[in-house]
Image (cartoon, rainbow, N blue to C red):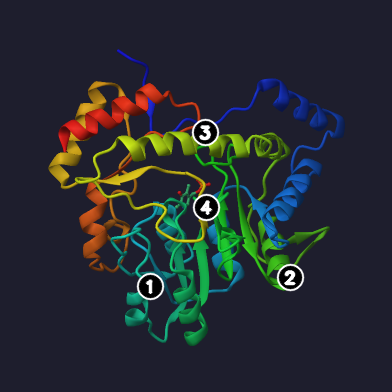
Amino acid sequence: MPDRINVTKSFLPPRQEYEQMLARIWDSEWLTNNGPLLVELEQKLQQKLDLPYLAITGNGTIAIQLAIKALNLSGEIITTPFSYCATTTSILWENLKPVFVDINREDLNINADLVENVITEKTTAILATHVYGNPCNVEKLEAIGKKYGLKIIYDAAHAFGVEYKGRSLLAYGDVSTCSFHATKVFHTVEGGCVVCHDPELYGTIRLMRSFGHVQDEYFLPGVNGKNSEFHAAMGLVNLGHLDAIIAGRKQVFALYDEMLNWDRLHKPTEKASDLVYNYAYYPVVLPDVATTLQVLEALKQENIYPRRYFYPTLNTLKYVPVQYDCPVSEDISPRVISLPLYPDLDHAIVRKIARIINEHI
Ligand SMILES: *Cc1c(COP(=O)(O)O)cnc(C)c1O
C-alpha cells in the first residue's frame, strides 16, 4: 500500500530554524499575552500586507466572532452557504440570524446579484467568504453595503498571499478575518487575524481579544482571543518560507491544470482578473454525485484522500434555525472535491491522481 496522501500536508520548517526562534522565548521568559515575538509577527504582517490595523488572534474562528462583536452587530447577517461551518456557526454563536444567499456557479462565491432581495430592516451586515482564496464580487458587495448601511465582513481564511487589484485581499470590507491554522498556506499552527481600517474599531478588537482588560481595569466584555509566543515563533519562521511554499503549490497546480480532462470537469478558482493567487486549494467540480463517489473510492484504493470541501452546504445544517433554498450550492456541494495540494507533493502522484480522475469521468 502506498503512503497515505491527504488533501494537504502541514508545512514544517527546518527544525533548527524553529529551535533558534524558541531560544528567544527562553531568553525573554515571556510565553504569551502580546509578547515580543507576537508583536514582531504582527508588525511584519502589517508591513508586508500594508494593513496597519491587523491584529493577530488565537485562531480564525475567534477572529470572525471578534469582528461580529466589535462591530456590535444585531439581527440578521447575510451569508454564504458555501464555506466552512465556522462562518455560519460564528453568526449563531453571537445569537444572530444567518440569512443565506446562494452562490454563483463560476467561482462558488456568494452571488452578489441576489443579496439585495433578502435585505430587511433587521439586516446589519454581510459575511461572505472568499472561497478557495478567490475574491468575492467585492465591488458590488461594497456598493450594497454603502447603499443600505450594512457592514461588510469577509471570512478571508483562504486568502493569505492573495492580491486583488494590487492590494492584499485582506484589505477589502469593513473587516476581514484570516486563519493561520496548520492546514492553511501560511500558518502559526493555530492562529488567525482580524483586519480593519478604523483606529477606534481596531482598539476595540484589541481590547476584546484580551478580556477587555487593560492593566488592572476592565473596559469591555471581552474574550480570550490571544495567541502565544510559540505560535508567533512558528509564524515568524514560516513567513521566510512563504514564497517557496506558494511557488511549490503553483507547480502542482499547473500540473493538474495540464493533466485533467476539462471537457468533464469545472475548475472554480482563479476566475477574477487582476489577481495574484496563492494556490491555496485545487477544487474540481465533477459531472454528478455518482461519479464523485466513484472517483473518491478509486482514489481511496490508492490511499489518496481528497476532501469534499465544502460539503454539506451550510444552509442545510440541522442547527440552522431557518431553512433557505440555495439550489446552486446544494447542486455543487456534493460533487466538488479539493485535490491533494502541497509544495512537496510528488509530481508522479499528481499525474496518477489526474489519471485516476480522468478514467472515471
Ligand atoms: C479554516 C477556516 C476557518 C477557521 O479557521 P480556524 O483558524 O481553524 O479557526 C474559517 N473559515 C474558513 C472558510 C476556513 O477555511
In the image, residue 349 sits, relative to residue 250, either above or below, namely above
**How many C-alpha atoms fall within 10 Å of the one at disc 4: few (<14), some, or many (≥20)?**
many
Whether ligand 1 has any atom under 8 Å from the Cβ at mark 1 is answered as no
Report x, y in % for residue 151: 53, 75
Disc 4 or 3, which lies upstream in sequence? 4
The residue mark sitting in front, 4 or 3, is: 3
Disc 1 target residue: 112
**Amino acid type, residue under disc 4 in the picture:** Ala
- Per the rendering, the mark at residue 341 is none
- Per the rendering, the mark at residue 159 is 4
Query: Residues under labels 4 and 2: Cα distance?
Result: 23 Å
Quadrant of the drawing holding the N terminus: top left
Report x, y in % for residue 260: 28, 38
Query: Residues under labels 1 and 3: Cα distance?
Result: 33 Å
In the image, residue 72 sits, relative to residue 273, either above or below, namely below
Whether ligand 1 has any atom under 8 Å from the Cβ at mark 2 is answered as no
Which residue appears at 69% of the width and 60% of the height? 51
Whether ligand 1 has any atom under 8 Å from the Cβ at mark 3 is answered as no
Disc 3 target residue: 248
Query: Residues under labels 2 and 1: Cα distance?
Result: 29 Å
The residue mark sitting in front, 1 or 3, is: 3
Question: Is residue 261 visible in the rendered structure shown here?
Answer: yes
In the image, residue 267 sits, relative to residue 328, either above or below, namely above
**Amino acid type, residue under disc 3 in the picture:** Gly
Query: Residues under labels 3 and 2: Cα distance?
Result: 37 Å
**Amino acid type, residue under disc 1 in the picture:** Ala
Disc 2 target residue: 199
Quadrant of the drawing holding the C terminus: top left
The residue mark sitting in front, 3 or 2, is: 3
SS at circle 3: helix
Which residue appears at 44% of the width and 70% of the height? 96
